[in-house]
Amino acid sequence: MMDTVKKIEILLVEDNPTDAELCIRALKKSNLANELVWVKDGAEALDFLFGTGAYAGRDLAATPKVVLLDLRLPKVDGMEVLRRIKEDERSRAIPVVVLTSSKEDRDIAESYQLGVNSFISKPVEFDAFAKTVSELGLYWLLVNHPPR
């Protein structure tokens, strides 16, 4: 299905269409959304990352530069997605940024114990949300140097 996509910059894992659209719009405004894949639940994220289900046959060498991961997801929750990403040798080095409405200490602590690279609580106000997404996109795509 996705074998035509050779270069993935961002994997956005977000079930809320409004939040996803705000993320995509903010990234487009900063010219960072050209190679973005949006999946709507944790199961689809895992299928995409590991080339299973609807993404069977996808070129697994085309790993995202960063995963933007919500925690409250249908089918497979964000903590389980994070656990699976960081436990697997093929995906362990992919930076994962939790972008969630949660501000709970236990979510923050568990995310870091599982190996998250950054934990960001979604700002409620639109302009602050857009600025946050744009800045994290700039950092993870242009400033950060991941291993290859």
Image (cartoon, rainbow, N blue to C red):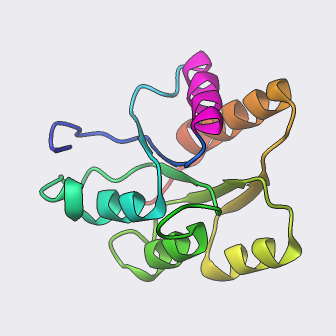
Q: Position of residue 46 (x, y in %)?
A: 37, 65
Query: Residue lying furthest left in this view?
Result: 57
Decide which of 147, 59 is in the foreground and name it.
Answer: 59
The boundaries of the magenta stretch are 17-30
Q: Is residue 44 left or right of residue 41?
A: left
Left or right, 66 with reference to 60: right
Q: Residue 107: which quarter of the image?
A: bottom right
Residue located at (31% from left, 56% from top): 48
Q: From where the camera sits, is residue 103 visible?
A: yes
Instruction: Give the residue drawn at x 63%, y 68%.
Output: 116
Residue 71 percent across, percent down from the top left: 64, 63
Q: Is residue 98 left or right of residue 62?
A: right
Residue 148 visible in the current orientation: no
Query: Which quarter of the figure is the C terminus placed in?
Result: bottom left
Residue 87 rendering spot, x and y as whole percentages: 45, 82
Choose top left, top right, bottom left or bottom right for residue 22.
Answer: top right
Q: Looking at the image, which is closer to me, 144 or 94?
A: 94
Q: Main secondary structure of the magenta part?
A: helix
Q: Residue at x 69, y 36 (%)?
A: 133
- Give the vertical position of 144 relative to 24 (above or below): below
| Side (left or right) of 103 relative to 50 | right
Q: How many marks?
A: 0
Depth check: give the residue in front, 116 or 127: 127
Residue drawn at x 82%, y 79% as measured from the top left: 106
Q: Quadrant of the N terminus?
A: top left
